[in-house]
Image (cartoon, rainbow, N blue to C red):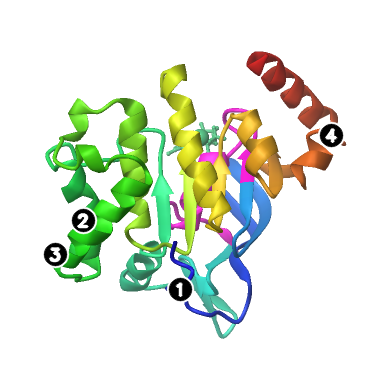
Amino acid sequence: MNQAAALPTQSDEIVAIRGLRKSYGTLEVLKGIDISVKRGEVVVVLGPSGSGKSTMLRCVNFLETFEHGTITVDGRPVGYKTVNGTRKPVSEAENASLREHVGMVFQSYNLFPHRTVLENVMMGPVKVKGIAAATARDIAMRLLGKVGMDHKADAYPGRLSGGQQQRVAIARALAMEPSVMLFDEVTSALDPELVGEVLKVMRELAEEGMTMIVVTHEMGFARGVADRVVFMDGGVVVEEGPPGDIMVAPKTDRFRGFLSRHLSEEG
Ligand code: ADP
Ligand code: MG
């Protein structure tokens, strides 16, 4: 949808994570992560609970600090830059500006409960981008239509199903015209019958060329939509490759075991 608005960049690499290390106190949860995502690519991250997937995603829009390594989004440094060989924090203004280019949807608690669906989607463009309310309303209605939620524009989030709320959350993130969308287990808290409607919206976004990093346990989505699958375990990337290769013929026992547990769950 926003190909026309995308600014040309020198590189086709939208997200570059290099040597990322992060600890909580003495517990090192990311032990040197390298992930590269090109424009239009869909990277699905698989891995057991506690392997560091959410922490990695949260580092990409600097919701978490990190001790080592670098991350860039559209060539812009996230969190830190190197000045004369020294690692320096970037300003809060730079971080805020970066976050405008990174859309993120979480497992839950995405929407402001005391704002209508329409207000939730309009808020970013109006307050952050300074877009006129009438224009923001048009943008929001178009995006709500895209996720099949325009008929609920005036409803409050509490009146919506979990699947509807997640579709609005996706529309809200898209309203900022992000360079990349990050999804962290957005269907994990949903009743099974609501999962499909959210995955469908994500699949359509992928088909339109949106750059996406998707943490999920939905194996069908990984197989059908990912350009590349990254398997994390214990704070490292254990395997990565096209789903048709590594999900069919995993190279490590760890990934093979993970797949056999999750594929059998899906039946
Ligand atoms: P995943 O998303 O793969 O389940 P997380 O990134 O949430 O994994 O967590 C990785 C590890 O970091 C886990 O051991 C978790 O307990 C720990 N962890 C996550 N957030 C915090 C935090 N705020 N403080 C301390 N430990 C944390
Ligand atoms: Mg997580």
Q: Residues within 10 Å of mark 4 (few under 14, many from 20)?
A: some
- Residue matched to label 3: 134
Residue 148 image point, x, y percent: 34, 40
Q: Are the residues flagged by discs 3 and 1 in contact, CB closer than 8 Å?
A: no
Q: Are the residues flagged by discs 4 and 2 in contact, CB closer than 8 Å?
A: no
- Sequence order check: which comes first, mark 3 or mark 2? 2
- Sequence order check: which comes first, mark 4 or mark 1? 1
Q: Are the residues flagged by discs 4 and 1 in contact, CB closer than 8 Å?
A: no
Quarter of the rendering containing residue 155:
top left
- Sequence order check: which comes first, mark 3 or mark 1? 1
In depth, the one of 170 and 235 nearer the eye is 170
Residue 97 image point, x, y percent: 35, 70
Q: Are the residues flagged by discs 3 and 2 in contact, CB closer than 8 Å?
A: no
Q: Residues within 10 Å of mark 1 (few under 14, many from 20)?
A: few
- Sequence order check: which comes first, mark 3 or mark 4? 3
- Magenta span: 44-69
In depth, the one of 132 and 12 nearer the eye is 132
The amino acid beneath tag 4 is Pro
Residue 91 image point, x, y percent: 36, 73
Q: Left of 218 or right of it: where is 161?
A: left
- Residue matched to label 4: 250
Circle number at residue 4: 1
Circle number at residue 122: 2
Which residue occupies the extreme bottom position in the image? 84
Q: Does residue 74 sit above or below 167 in this rendering?
A: below
User: How far apart are the two marked residues, 3 and 2, measured between alpha carbons?
Assistant: 10 Å
The answer to whether residue 97 is magenta is no
Q: Left of 141 or right of it: where is 253?
A: right
